[in-house]
Amino acid sequence: MSDDLTIYRRILPHWRLDGSLYFVTWRLDRDQPPLDGSERDLVAGAVRYFNVTRYDLFAYVVMNDHVHALVAPTGTHALQAIVHSWKSFTAHRLQRPGRGRRIWQPEYFDRIVRDAEEVREKLDYIVGNPFKRWPGITSYPWLWFDPSAFQ
């Protein structure tokens, strides 16, 4: 792991540290209707697509208006390029009548996960997110996590 921390800012600050695990969140644009089931399938598929080849994915959840992922970029793949590809690919595929041109908010939130305790906290948050929003559900098909990440 490199000790070279870089920081840049768009609207939000973004900290980058080689070899880090990140908690990432992005949201639908304010004027967008909620994602339906087939749209959530599309987003989930995009998030999983380059798992192992460009990043290691530990967990994700695709909600009706936002997405959370716990991801560690690998090789020369930068987090901002990974998130850009997720958002760009899905935005193009989600274009249809009733959806405005901007699908996702332009910015996203990311945080370097610092230790095992925070890994557990972020995993619990991701896994619990749909059950907190919709307390009556017993399963949620747009949620995935690596069980070994909980050990």
Image (cartoon, helix red, strand yellow):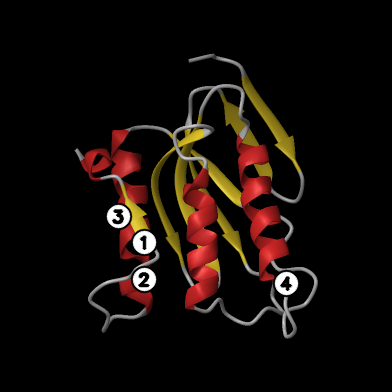
- In the displayed structure image, the side of residue 52 where residue 39 appears, left or right: right
Instruction: Give the distance between the C-alpha atoms of the residues marked 2 and 4, in whole angstroms.
Output: 25 Å
Residue 20 in the image, given as x and y percentages of width and height: 48, 29
Residue 82, given in percent of the width and then of the height, sits at 61, 41
Determine the residue positioned at 57% across, 80% down.
Answer: 34
Mark 2 vs 4, N-terminal side: 4
Quarter of the figure with the C terminus: top left
Q: Residues within 10 Å of mark 2 (few under 14, many from 20)?
A: many
Q: Earlier in the sequence, mark 2 or mark 1?
A: 2
In x, y percent, where is residue 33? 63, 82
Q: Nearer the viewer, mark 3 or mark 1?
A: 1
- Marks 4 and 1: which is nearer the front? 4
Between the C-alphas of marks 4 and 1, the distance is 23 Å
What amino acid is labelled 1 in the image? Leu
Residue at left 61%, top 51%? 86
Residue under the image location 77 percent in, 77 percent down: 100
Q: CA distance from mark 4 to mark 3?
A: 32 Å
**Can you identify the residue that label 3 sits on?**
124
User: Could you say where residue 55 lies in the image, as x and y percent from the top left?
Assistant: 49, 34
Q: Is residue 64 visible?
A: no
